[in-house]
Image (spheres, grey):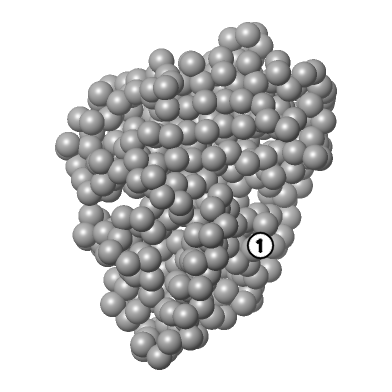
Amino acid sequence: MKREATFMRKALTSKPSHFLPRKERIVVPSLLDTDFYKLTMMQVVLHQYASAWVRYAFKWRNWDEMHLKGSLENFKSKVDEEIEKLCRLRFQEDELAYLVSIHFFKPDFIEYLRLFHFNSSYIKTSIEEGQLKINIEGPWLTTILYEIPVLAVVSELYSRMHGVDDATWMKEGRKHLKDKVAFLNKAITPKQNFKFAEFGTRRRTSYAWQEEVLQYLISHCGDMLVGTSNVHFAMKLGIRPIGTMAHEFFQAHQQLGPRLVDSQKVALQCWADEYRGELGIALSDTMGFDKFLKDFDRFFSLLFNGCRQDSGDPVLWTEKLIAHYKKMRIDPKSKSAIYSDGLTFESAVDIFNRFNNQIQTSFGIGTDLTNDCGFIAPQLVIKMVGCNGNPVAKVSDSEDKGMCEDQEFLGYLHKVIREDINSEN
């Protein structure tokens, strides 16, 4: 509590970045300005896959809906400038001390972070067919942290260059935020155990706006807010960092494991070997939920605290998960279901009311909190597409969220998944 109070005092006495001149405005101020699961995965990579070589690709899913003011060439040049700034960042001593206080981060990982910095030779931007392209390729250990800050850079630069001035969109954003929280406080009674975390770093309108959102949530949501995925703000505001693993962890194992059909089992076992029961929420949709449940046998179902839903129908997903736990002779009420797929408070409350008496529920809410300011939010992703020179794929339960650059590999992966689901074992 003493450490949290110190970080809170620093936050309250620091000058908010939205009061700075535009040329001094912070986009990504710290290497901790990232999602927690990037650091938890990074430790596993250091210990078990330090030699793995990977490639990531950028995708702007709703580019056709965007209204960029000015040339795309100018936008790209500003992205490049911010990437150069990222490459000058280092972990600071107070940031490392904060990570040391998180008991499952090991001393050798902290010492590696002390030396870490981004290498600009591993990231390239270009314009192809009228769209921004970003390619990241290099050692997994030294490229894994690029995703979140690069997406935050692109998202904030779009906010600055889409033609609506800051005062206008911030006024709209504050109104929306106030209405959302008012709805939540009316919909949930004090006795109900509704829990949510803020998950909006990668698509935030700006760094300053994400901080303002979090401060408002802390002030007005009480114990319903359990934390944030953003490590920098968790440290600064004295709240809990939230996260375990992302799709790339399972994707990489498609080329790191002994057999493609067993890749998810290998990834889950690898995670268990590293964290020994900590960080026990498993992501469930990298190869489709049905295949995940086939791999998530009684051993893993007992070992992991629960699962995270990030695509597909959340109602169907929850019904399948509850049935699976019952089949494994496990009380679903002892396990957690975490939801993080394009949620709003309204959709989260609907899911909570439907299932909270059957399984423990919690919600990660991102874009709807950090980029709902009166204009269309950019839908940006960076996904792993290759590992050790071979293709990998995300097979999502939502068709538009899948990603693979090699159709032959994707077809083979689908065949492996179908055959395994239909097999007796």
Binning the other alpha carbons within 10 Å of mark 1 as few (below 14), some (14 to 19) or many (20 upward) gives few
Horizontal relation, residue 155 to residue 170: left or right = left
Q: Quadrant of residue 165?
A: top right
**In the image, what residue type sits under mark 1?**
Glu
State the residue at coordinates (54%, 53%). Answer: 406
Horizontal relation, residue 365 to residue 55: left or right = right
State the residue at coordinates (56%, 75%). Answer: 318
Horizontal relation, residue 334 to residue 384: left or right = left
Horizontal relation, residue 220 to residue 183: left or right = left
With respect to residue 290, does 146 lie above or below? above
Disc 1 target residue: 399
With respect to residue 411, does 320 lie above or below? below
State the residue at coordinates (71%, 60%). Answer: 346
Point out residue 75 in the picture as x, y percentages from the top left corner: 69, 20
Point out residue 261 in the picture as x, y percentages from the top left corner: 38, 71
> Which quarter of the image is occupied by the C terminus?
bottom left
Q: Secondary structure at mark 1?
A: helix
The answer to whether residue 238 of the structure is visible from this angle is: no
Disc tally is 1
The answer to whether residue 108 of the structure is visible from this angle is: yes
Q: Nearer the viewer, residue 342 or 357?
A: 342
